[in-house]
Image (cartoon, helix red, strand yellow):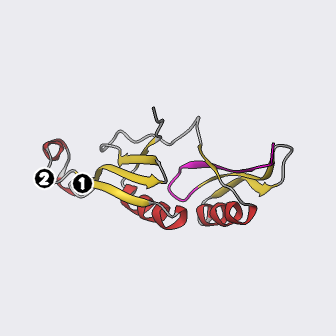
Amino acid sequence: MHLSPYLLFNGDCEAAFKFYEKVLGGKIDAMFTNEGTPAAKDVPPEWQKKILHARLLLGDRALMASDAPPGRYEKPQGFSVSLEIETPKESERVFHALSEKGTVVMPIQETFWAVRFGMLTDRFGIPWMINCSKPM
């Protein structure tokens, strides 16, 4: 069994996933628009090119998402996408890239459990936690 976060965006899913693919080194293996699908009849013309479903592979895990239907988007709250990164240098790189044009909630730093830990909300409104654990 695998647990995969599914994010909803306010019309910028494609831009977000292309950004995440670049920053996280993943691979987008699915990106479907509403156009040409049964969903097309349920969205206005200006929403035809918006994302119905996207999947970004990161190793053997996936991050999935879509653009919320018109009028149904709600600001993400009450969760964070958590990344466990192996080295302090890489965790700092990812943290700074994701926080560009976003909001730093907790600067990346050493904590009692981690060599590096930080929290941010990216430019697309998605909350993230970046963690580089201390050896057990």
Image quadrant in which you'd find residue 95: bottom right
Compare residues 50 and 63 and report the one nearer the observer: 63
Determine whether, in the image, residue 108 is placed left or right of residue 101: right
Give the percent coordinates (x, y) of residue 92.
71, 63
| Amino acid under disc 1 | Thr
Queried whether the magenta region covers residue 93, the answer comes back as no
Residue at (84% x, 53% y) in the render: 110
Please tell me whether residue 29 is drawn above or below residue 133 in the rendered image. below
Read off the residue under disc 2.
36
Compare residues 131 and 102 and report the one nearer the observer: 131
Q: Are the residues at dot 2 and dot 1 in contact (C-beta closer than 8 Å)? A: yes
Determine whether, in the image, residue 1 is placed left or right of residue 88: left
Give the percent coordinates (x, y) of residue 30.
31, 54
Read off the residue under disc 1.
33
| Amino acid under disc 2 | Gly
Q: Count the labels in the image.
A: 2
Using a 10 Å C-alpha cutoff, classify the residue at mark 2 as few (fewer than 14 neighbours), some (14 to 19) or many (20 or more): few
Residue at (30% x, 44% y) in the render: 70
The magenta segment is 122-136
Quadrant where the image shows the N terminus: top left
Q: Which residue lies furthest to the top in this view?
A: 1
Give the percent coordinates (x, y) of residue 124.
50, 56
Image quadrant in which you'd find residue 85: bottom right
